[in-house]
């Protein structure tokens, strides 16, 4: 894995679908920014050991001296801070309890703590509350609230957060990996080589759940559903768009939030289906609480050793103790179906709001998520109730007086690991399908582009392979608090991972799907010179039985690889795109250890090369499905349309960390595949289907000349 040259301060817009996989900028780092970044890195080490992160006497003095009641004037929303302090005095969740944002008590506390961070007027106040919370609140509660605050405060846009799978490795790596890491530390790193001038470097081979048990077909794609990058992508989506957060109060870009939520789920489903086809698996079944659900064995344990519950194959959710919640979910479903069929939302005041296509997509997405931007989220809060029921029953976890029993469906970090959740996403997306089906197909003039014809599309050979990826899981191992006599360059700087005063880094090395870079070349003849938008999709051509899929039935199975603005000229146009520049991908995250090294070597005030990392975005290594050794046929769908300026103008401000949209144009996100297809009028000159074959090789075969 690549080591960066300088600290990664600036992150780019998540969910914007206009950023690339990384770029090189030149920034001048000031001392204040370096100190802020250092503080964030320090406090996210060993989250279950507050005395380790708050290790200096000066830190502890700040914790002891901070008084909420005497500091209300330091916050821009005093009532919100008073609410948190009231909850704190009444008693927050225990330190050793598993945090879940889907638990109502936990969520109330998390929102209250987020408010404390969010409404701090300046860095000094923010930092003091950060130290106080790090020492006094549940680690899961702390990390979640801090993430949401950092992402949504524009003044902290330059701060980099370590990858969530390195903060909480227990959620991303099987329990045997964590156990081996702990055993090695207990054995004093006997026989372990040192790197970087006296740093223990221990590497553990990590695998996926199907290497331990193989009892259901979905485990064939565990390398995809359990990929740490994909699960981090889903986690950060929930940080960028929390279902409890309203747009107006937190300056969350609102224009297309609901539409993006639907698009996000559709794209995940499409990409998952492509991967299933590579393993001869078929259509994703739609979830029902009344039908048997596939089993799942997560092989995860919490920090305190509690196993994430397994589910036997053939489990049916509708059973004793769950009737009430499922009946509620059915009622929400009926409310949504009635609104879709009638084209009207029932408002809380008893009146109706028209949400016919296309403007109603925004409202439908918000209603499905059940967020405060919904026109009536108490009446249409479908997913909120479903999430609670999933974690409580389908995951066979249990709630005892607010306590959460471990279930992968109760944690955004682990949700995608369970095949049942993909079935649930299919169910959620069915509401959108019904909505757009009622709207009918596009007219020819809405998908055609007069004067523009795609003559051909040429694609390099597409090759995938598995390569080794290292993640820093040092947080999985407890350490002794630092003492004044323990000193090294890294420890002096603030990295507290050590054994008897010697620095260590423990890495989990896992085989992850990747692909060779490739080029797409589009040859276009045009009689017009106008701004245009090019979309490149990847989809299936055949189902698992080798039958060609009908173009209309296939429309939701396409994954958007790239979308970009292009200034068309008259005559021949050769449009060339490199896969490394596709618009919505992000590269592998830099490890916690490397981030610390980079920050420590940063020269304040000196201009340095800076590799920009997004905290969110689809993993670039997963752009292509695995394919097969002898090759598997898929197809590219390329469409060119006139440029329609977006309501929110695109920006090159990569200082925006999270949630601002950089839409390329103002057309629907999944255009033109978002509506039913009339085959008699579908094929226009400005679109092109091109068969491509994806070959899967070993790493050595893929990289040999």
Image: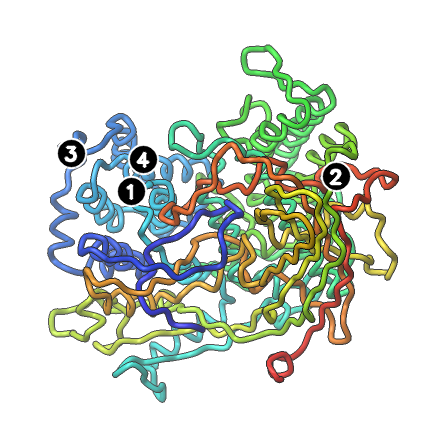
Vertical comparison of 450 with 301: above or below:
above
Check contact, mark 1 vs mark 4: CB within 8 A. Answer: no
**Disc 1 or 2, which lies upstream in sequence?**
1
Say how the picture is coloured. rainbow
Q: In which quadrant is the C terminus drawn?
A: bottom right
**Looking at the picture, how far across and down is residue 635, in whole percent?**
75, 58
Q: Earlier in the sequence, mark 4 or mark 3?
A: 3
Q: Is mark 2 on a helix, strand or loop?
A: loop
Residue position for label 3: 71
x and y percent of residue 662 in the render? 49, 42
Mark 1 vs mark 3, foreground winner is 1
Residue matched to label 2: 448
Query: Helix, strand or loop at disc 1?
Result: helix
Tell me if label 3 and label 2 are in contact, CB under 8 Å.
Answer: no
Residue 378 in percent (x, y) is at 54, 24
Residue on which the image places disc 4:
115
């Amino acid at each position: 894995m690549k080591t960066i040259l300088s600290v990664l301060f600036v992150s780019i817009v998540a969910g914007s679908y206009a950023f690339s996989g990384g770029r090189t900028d030149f920034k001048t780092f000031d001392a204040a920014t370096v100190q802020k970044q250092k503080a964030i890195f320090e406090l996210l080490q060993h989250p279950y050991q507050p005395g380790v992160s708050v290790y200096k006497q000066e830190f502890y003095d700040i914790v002891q001296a901070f008084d909420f009641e005497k500091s209300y004037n330091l916050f821009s929303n005093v009532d919100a801070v008073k609410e948190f302090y009231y909850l704190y005095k009444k008693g927050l969740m225990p330190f050793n309890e598993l945090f879940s944002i889907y638990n109502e008590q936990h969520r109330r506390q998390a929102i209250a703590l987020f408010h404390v961070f969010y409404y701090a007027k300046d860095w000094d106040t923010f930092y003091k509350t950060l130290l106080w919370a790090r020492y006094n609140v549940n680690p899961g509660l702390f990390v979640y609230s801090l993430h949401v605050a950092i992402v949504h405060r524009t003044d902290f846009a330059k701060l980099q957060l370590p990858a969530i799978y390195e903060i909480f490795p227990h959620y991303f790596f099987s329990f045997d990996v964590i156990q081996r890491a702990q055993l090695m530390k207990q054995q004093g790193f006997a026989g372990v080589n040192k790197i970087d001038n006296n740093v223990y470097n221990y590497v553990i081979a990590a695998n996926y759940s199907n290497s331990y048990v193989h009892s259901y077909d979905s485990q064939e794609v565990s390398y995809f559903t359990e990929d740490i990058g994909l699960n981090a992508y889903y986690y950060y989506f929930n940080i960028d768009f929390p279902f409890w957060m309203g747009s107006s109060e937190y300056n969350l870009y609102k224009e297309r939030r609901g539409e993006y939520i639907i698009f996000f789920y559709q794209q995940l489903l499409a990409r998952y289906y492509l991967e299933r086809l590579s393993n001869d698996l078929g259509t994703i079944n739609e979830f029902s609480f009344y039908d048997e659900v596939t089993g799942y064995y997560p092989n995860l344990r919490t920090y305190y050793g509690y196993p994430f519950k397994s589910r036997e194959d053939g489990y049916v959710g509708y059973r004793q103790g769950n009737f009430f919640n499922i009946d509620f979910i059915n009622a929400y479903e009926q409310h949504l179906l009635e609104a879709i069929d009638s084209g009207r939302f029932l408002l809380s005041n008893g009146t109706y709001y028209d949400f016919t296509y296309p403007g109603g997509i925004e409202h439908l997405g918000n209603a499905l998520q059940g967020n405060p931007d919904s026109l009536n989220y108490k009446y249409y809060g479908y997913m909120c109730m479903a999430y609670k029921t999933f974690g409580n029953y389908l995951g066979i976890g249990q709630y005892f007086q607010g306590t959460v029993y471990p279930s992968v469906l109760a944690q955004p970090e682990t949700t995608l690991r369970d095949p049942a959740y993909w079935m649930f996403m299919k169910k959620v997306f069915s509401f959108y399908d019904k909505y757009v089906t009622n709207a009918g197909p596009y007219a020819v003039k809405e998908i055609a582009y007069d004067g523009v014809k795609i003559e051909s599309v040429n694609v390099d050979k597409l090759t995938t392979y598995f390569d080794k990826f290292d993640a820093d899981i040092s947080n999985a191992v407890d350490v002794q608090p630092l003492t004044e006599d323990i000193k090294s360059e890294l420890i002096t700087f603030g990295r507290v991972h050590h054994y008897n005063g010697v620095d260590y880094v423990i890495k989990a090395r896992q085989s992850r799907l990747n692909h060779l870079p490739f080029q797409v070349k589009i040859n276009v003849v045009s009689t017009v010179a106008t701004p245009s938008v090019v979309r490149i999709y990847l989809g299936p051509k055949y189902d698992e039985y080798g039958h060609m899929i009908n173009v209309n039935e296939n429309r939701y199975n396409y994954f958007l690889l790239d979308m970009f603005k292009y200034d068309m000229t008259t005559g021949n146009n050769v449009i060339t795109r490199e896969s490394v520049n596709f618009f919505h991908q992000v590269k592998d995250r830099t490890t916690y250890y490397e981030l610390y090294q980079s920050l420590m070597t940063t020269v304040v005030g000196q201009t340095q090369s800076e590799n920009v990392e997004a905290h969110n975005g689809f993993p670039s290594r997963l752009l292509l499905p695995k394919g097969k050794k002898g090759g598997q046929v898929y197809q590219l769908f390329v469409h060119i349309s006139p440029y329609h300026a977006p309501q929110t103008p695109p920006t090159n401000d990569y200082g925006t960390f999270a949630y601002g949209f950089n839409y390329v144009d103002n057309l629907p996100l999944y255009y033109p595949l978002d509506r039913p297809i009339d085959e008699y009028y579908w094929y226009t000159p400005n679109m092109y289907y091109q068969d491509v074959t994806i070959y899967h090789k070993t790493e050595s075969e893929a990289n040999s000349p």
